[in-house]
Each structure stands twice: as structure tokens, then as C-alpha cells.
Image (cartoon, grey):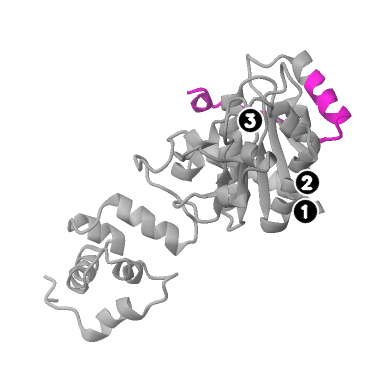
Amino acid sequence: MNTTTTLSQADFAKVKQSSRHSNIGQLLLQQGKLTASQAEKVLLAQQELGLRFGEAAVRLGFLSEQDIQEVLSRQFDYPCLTVGDPSLDSRLIAAYHNDSSQVEALRSLRSQLILRWISGGNKTICVAGYENETAVGWLAANLAIVFSQLGLRTLLVDASLRRPIQHVFFKQANKMGLSDILAGRADESCMLAIPPLPDLFLIPGGTDVPNKQELLSGVALAGFLEQAEADFDIVIVNAPALKGNADGQLVAARAKGVLLLAEPGVSKVDDLEAARDDLRMAGATVLGCVLNSFAIAQQ
């Protein structure tokens, strides 16, 4: 029978004095999620039941699984939300499902982009597609998240001025954004921080203006991206659809590096080849073609 009835001062001091990056108990105390008395009871339960500190705290009813996930993300400097957290749209899988095969695929894509593009001194990546703007926006948003999770200051720019979607994904207002910056009506102060993801920032599409193509074709976009590269480690640009108008080509020409999205059973090879050729003629470098088979992108 276990005869331990109280926690020694020395043992309790371990909780109070441990590094914030190595002791979950200390983090929970600092955030006010546990009292000193509760922490003592958790440590006793941990010893008696052979559980991890977080597991014991949940077993005793002091914390929820969401509390544990939040503190773990801080402990390992890897921001990730728990499933069901309403802060962001659930389609942003990189923010919610860090151990899923889909997110692993996004991390693999991130690695390829770092090796083949970013390591050469490039910072801006344009995500474009022939037709499905929702799927393009989904890829751009999740790619921006996985870059920010590396601790890189990441800016996501919604340049799809006809059908902006990033403010929907991140549950932000779309009062001012890129269109206002390009028209000289606003500056970078309209940039939005994304609180659950401390290294990610968003510039939404902005005001619905009648001269979208003219704004995207002007020199202001090049100047904006140049300044963004000076201020951020990574700039992800959500381009308009390539089908039907020149908006996408104009954005790609300014961004230089383009990731082309294809969808199985939807995208036609002829259309993709034509899009690739048009992008190259516009002066953009086609970094590759991503086959998106995730149904969640279509929701």
C-alpha cells in the first residue's frame, strides 16, 4: 500500500522552479490554470497512478484536454488548436490536426519549397489554380500556417480580389485590405494578427472595388510585396483563378514563384499546361504542381 500522504517541500519546489520549456506544471501555474494546492494534488496522483502530469490533472477534473493541448503547444513552441476550438474555420487542418497525414503532406510540401525556392533567397510564394478559388485559398491558408509553426514570421495575402476567402477561414473582418493598400487608401496597419498563431499575419482582400485588374497590374503591388519581404520571413499570396481573366497572371508575375494547384478528376491536363505556359510568359517561375485530393478543401 502506498503510504505517501503529502508532498514534500522539495518535490513541490520542482514544479515552481522548473524551466517553462520543460515543465508543464510550471506553465499551468503561470497561466493560472492550476492553483498551488491543485498542483500538489496532481503530483500526488501522478506518483500514485503512474500518469503524466497532464493526464493526472485531467483525471482529477482540474483541467480539460483543451487546456493540456494549449499548454503543450506553448511548451514546444508549436501553436496548435484543439478540435472544436471555434477560433478558426475547421478547414484549416494545419491548425487543428498536427498529427494527420494531410498535415504531414503539407509539411513535406513546405520542406520542398524551402529546399528548392526559399534557400535561394526567395521569400514570396504565390498559390494559384485554374478554376477552384476555394481550394486555392485552402492550400494557401494551410501552407501559411505550417510555415508560421516553424517560428517564421509569415504574411498571408489575399490577392483574390473578386472572391476573397481568407477572412472567412480566419474569422476576421474584411473591411480594409489589399485593394485599399493598392489604391492608396490604407497602409500595412490594416494587417491582422491571428491570435492563436503568433507568427502568422493576414492582409485580407479588402474593399470590393470596380477596378480590380487595374490595381493588380499597377506598380503598387510590386512595391507592396517588396516591403512585405523586408518585414517578413515568408510571404504567401493567394492568387485569383487563372481562368477567365488576367488577374492571376498579374499577381504571379509580381510574386515570381508560383505553386500551381490541380485537382484529380476536375483539372484538365490541357488547362494546366496552358496555365503553366501563361505563367512562364508572364515572367513567373512555376515551382511545381500540387495534386489536391482533400475533400475538406471543397467544403
Seen from the viewer's position, the closer of residues 201 and 72 is 201
Residue located at (63% from left, 21% from top): 263
Q: Could you tell me which secondary element the residue under label 1 belongs to?
A: helix
**Residue displayed at 40% across by 59% down:** 72
Give the amino acid at mark 1: Ser
Q: Do the residues labelled 3 and 1 touch (CB within 8 Å)?
A: no
Contact? badges 3 and 2 (CB < 8 Å): no
The residue identified by callout 2 is: 116
Residue 286 is inside the magenta segment = yes
Above or below, 78 against 160 in this view is below
Residue 288 seen anywhere in this rendered image of the structure: no
| Amino acid identity at mark 2 | Arg
**Amino acid of disc 3:** Ser
Residue at 75% in and 42% down: 220
Q: Name the residue under label 1.
A: 119
Residue range highlighted in magenta: 273-299
- Residue 218: which disc? none
Depth-wise, is mark 3 or mark 2 nearer the camera? 3
**Residue on which disc 3 sits:** 160
Quarter of the image where one finds residue 290: top right
Other-residue count near label 1 (Cα within 10 Å), few / some / many at <14 / 14–19 / ≥20: few
Cα distance between the residues tagged 3 and 1: 27 Å
The secondary structure type at the circle numbered 2 is helix
Residue 257: say if magenta.
no
Task: Check whether the beta carbons of the residues at disc 1 and disc 2 lie within 8 A of each other.
Answer: yes
Residue 291, given in percent of the width and then of the height, sits at 66, 27
Q: Is residue 215 visible?
A: yes
Number of dots carrying numbers:
3
